[in-house]
Amino acid sequence: MLEITLSFLVSLVFCTLGTTIGYHRLLAHRSFRCPKAVEYFFVGCGYLAFQTSPIWWASMHRIHHKYSDQEKDPHAILHGWRRSVYGWIFDERYPEYLDKNLVSPDLVNDPIYRFLDCNGDVQKGHLLNGFLNFMCRFAMVPFFGWKIALGSLLAGLAMQQITLWFNLVSHMPQWGYKNYDTADDSTNNAFLTVLTLGEGLHNNHHAVPGSANNSMKKGEIDIGWWIINGMRKVGLVSWANDGFAHRLESNLRISPNSTDIKRFGPIPVPSEQMQEEPVLVNS
Ligand SMILES: [Zn+2]
Ligand SMILES: [Zn+2]
């Protein structure tokens, strides 16, 4: 049991980093730059956390930012909690208003991501992901034993659930606080922040989506950013948007210097979706 638990916990850290650093901050937002080998490592960790096609994931997420909590937001709460958590992943195809060649040209150009996307057949992409996840754990057995493999598999499945429920909980204003008066319901949730190594600072993220750093004031801890910044210091990351221009002074909710947020936004997404500048909640 100890072996399974330890394998689960260590694997969960890698699954979380693969999702937050690989899929979210790197692929969906291009908030830092790194060599392709580093990108594939983190994306691989996310893929083994049942996050499925990188193109699908990042494109749906870019659309989530564009239409947050509106009709076209794939997992908006207004569609009901069942669709918000699970229903949206069972759609056969991409939404008709989402052309992945326009929304994610940077990802469509990558042959590995293209292969994993199964020609836009979303369900086929999920099945391939499930198949490769299980095969990878079977392949681990002769080398590490079935307990390590099982712990790793359970961590991947747990991360899948955390991601799906994250989409609902991170847009529940009653369960957190807002620093920025964004046009959506995104919320900073302390529990999610601990659970996902910094992703739970979701209101900060919606205000400054291109920042690799979600911590926007003293006391907000973003371990994902610590790791990205650490990699920058040792040369594994060549550039990262630290978001410091929009950081809030202590608890004083003063207006940050107005810099052009658009340049921090996801590279291929039309700039009009980005807010001109974060609007602060009046204290
Ligand atoms: Zn969101
Ligand atoms: Zn995002």
Image (spheres, rainbow, N blue to C red):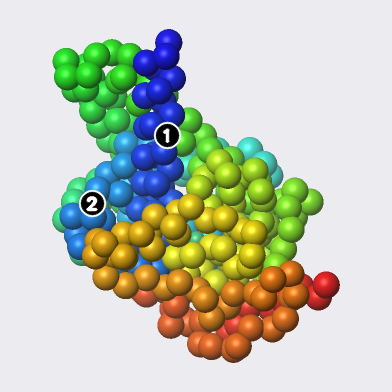
> What is the distance, in whole Å, between disc 2 and disc 1 at their CAs?
18 Å
Mark 2 nearby-residue class (10 Å; few <14, some 14–19, many ≥20): some
The residue shown at (39%, 55%) is 227
Q: Quadrant of the C terminus?
A: bottom right
Q: Is residue 206 above or below residue 167?
A: below
Mark 1 nearby-residue class (10 Å; few <14, some 14–19, many ≥20): many
Q: Where is residue 225 shown, x and y percent of the image?
A: 45, 59
Could you say which disc has been placed on residue 195 in the image? none
Point out the tag, 2 or 1, that comes first from the N-terminus: 1
Inspect the image, locate mark 2, and give the three-letter code of the amino acid beneath it.
Tyr
Q: Quadrant of the N terminus?
A: top left
Residue 37 in sight from this viewpoint: yes
Give the camera-side residue of 36 and 74: 36
According to the picture, the residue beneath numbered tag 1 turns out to be 12
Secondary structure found at label 1: helix
According to the picture, the residue beneath numbered tag 2 turns out to be 40
Inspect the image, locate mark 1, and give the three-letter code of the amino acid beneath it.
Leu
Q: Quadrant of residue 215?
A: bottom right
The residue furthest top is 1
Q: Is residue 255 left or right of residue 270?
A: right
Q: Is residue 30 left or right of residue 158?
A: left
Q: Where is residue 267 shown, x and y percent of the image?
A: 37, 74
The residue shown at (64%, 65%) is 218
Secondary structure found at label 2: helix
Give the camera-side residue of 202 and 185: 202
The residue shown at (48%, 52%) is 223
Task: Tell me if label 2 and label 1 are in contact, CB under 8 Å.
Answer: no
Q: Quadrant of residue 224?
A: bottom left
